[in-house]
Image: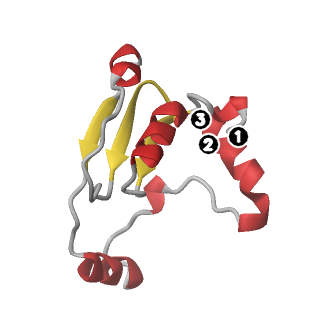
Amino acid sequence: ALPDELRGAFDVVVDATGTVEGLKMAATLTMAMGTIVLKSTCASQATIDTSAFVVQELNIVGSRCGPFPEAMKLLEDSSLDVSKYISAVFPLERVAEALEMARSR
């Protein structure tokens, strides 16, 4: 079960699952007036209750597949400075601390 402190804790949530369950989870994690980025395509048709999206005034943004090899090369050779987007780096063992930091921002 999802811990209560994570419900509505994030202003932006990326759903890359391609499933209805993933989209529902993203809606649960996203704060009111927040944004859900759909990074994958649901392969099958599904029915979903959209009331949470309306009541919480959630924004849903699609993200197409992009030129990943070129993007990775830009990151690898430092052609693209992304340091301003990184506020901290945590090892996996400190995931609880990382989530707390993300929640407090």
Question: Marks 1 and 2: in contact by CB < 8 Å?
Answer: no
> What amino acid is found at the position of numbered circle 1 in the picture?
Ala
Compared with 65, 99 (above or below) is above
Pinpoint residue 75: horizontal percent, then vertical percent. 38, 77
Name the residue that disc number 2 marks.
Answer: 102
Pinpoint residue 28: horizontal percent, then vertical percent. 52, 32
Tag nearer the camera, 1 or 3: 1
Q: Which residue is drawn at 67% across and 46% down?
A: 99
Count of numbered circles in the view: 3
Name the residue that disc number 1 marks.
Answer: 1
> Left or right of 39: which side holds 9?
right
Rounded to the nearest angstrom, the CA distance separating label 2 from label 3 is: 6 Å
Rounded to the nearest angstrom, the CA distance separating label 2 from label 1 is: 20 Å
Quadrant that contains the C terminus = top right
Q: Upstream in the sequence, badge 1 or badge 3?
A: 1
Q: Residue at x 61, y 42 (%)?
A: 102
> What amino acid is found at the position of numbered circle 3 in the picture?
Arg
Q: Which residue is drawn at 76% across and 50% down?
A: 96
